[in-house]
Amino acid sequence: MFQLIEEASITAHPHIFQPKYERRKGEIRYIGIPFSQKALEGWGGDFRLSEEGVEVAPGIITTGVVPRLTPFEGSDKDLVVKTDNGVEEDKLLDDLSLIIDTPKGQILVLGCAHAGLINTLTHVKDLTGKDSFFWVIGGTHLGFFGPERLEEVIEALQAFHINTLGGSHCTGLVAGARLARTLGDHFRFCNVGFTIEV
């Protein structure tokens, strides 16, 4: 059940309203937002759509579009959008993360890291000038990687100083266990209900 509110400020990428689909076993299923922008605005949504990073509150900014630089990350050919040219792979440019500046260090809250964990960390380093993180928490998209690609990500992680990496949902149990073996106490499984205080 929906509860109407007077106004909600929503910061997102302009592609959030693209018609998005999942293609599995020859079938295409709609997985996009089930309401139009106009309908959501009518219910109190105030949209600030930007491809660039946006400050949503003091000390909290979005990443904006994350450049795809690594050869071993990104791309999911089963996620598609419908365009005037037909069905095309969804580049998922609207998958943003949040950077939170805290007295203990910066925290990166990942959406699903479709651009890649290393690409996202590199982009944040470029934006903030910092390669150290108090927490990196959220979906890392590593649950979809085979062993070889996973090892490439784990090796590339060594370039960053991460106090705690908290893997959620699309990290997957296998990748999570592999990260735990490498990072030891610096890795945590972050299931529903997990909280951190800063």
Image (cartoon, grey):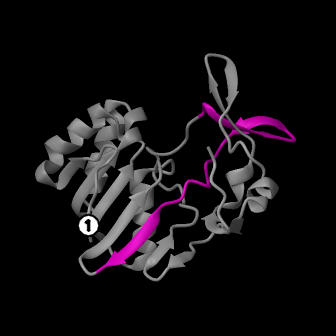
Percent position of residue 159, x then y? 27, 62
Percent position of residue 156, x then y? 30, 53
Task: Identify the residue position indicated by label 1 in the image.
Answer: 197
Q: Identify the magenta region.
A: 77-102
Quarter of the rendering occupied by the N terminus: top right
In this view, the residue in front, 41 or 50, is: 41
- In this rendering, the answer to whether 41 lies above or below 171 is below
| For residue 81, side relative to residue 100 (left or right) | right
Judge whether residue 82 is colored magenta. Answer: yes
| For residue 15, side relative to residue 193 (left or right) | right
Q: Quadrant of residue 88?
A: top right
Percent position of residue 92, x then y? 61, 48
Quarter of the rendering occupied by the C terminus: bottom left
Percent position of residue 148, x then y? 33, 34
Q: Residue furthest left?
A: 185
Judge whether residue 98 is colored magenta. Answer: yes
- In this rendering, the answer to whether 23 lies above or below 39 is above
| For residue 145, side relative to residue 93 (left or right) | left
Residue type pointed to by label 1 = Glu
- Determine the residue positioned at 22% across, 59% down: 164
Badge 1, how many Cα within 10 Å: few under 14, some, many 20+?
Answer: few
- In this rendering, the answer to whether 30 lies above or below 10 is above
- Determine the residue positioned at 70% across, 25% down: 28
Q: Residue furthest top?
A: 25
- Determine the residue positioned at 49% across, 74% down: 61
In this view, the residue in front, 108 or 9, is: 9
| For residue 131, side relative to residue 43 (left or right) | left
In this view, the residue in front, 160 or 2, is: 2
Q: Quadrant of residue 144?
A: top left
Q: Which SS class for mark 1?
A: loop
- Determine the residue positioned at 48% across, 61% down: 97
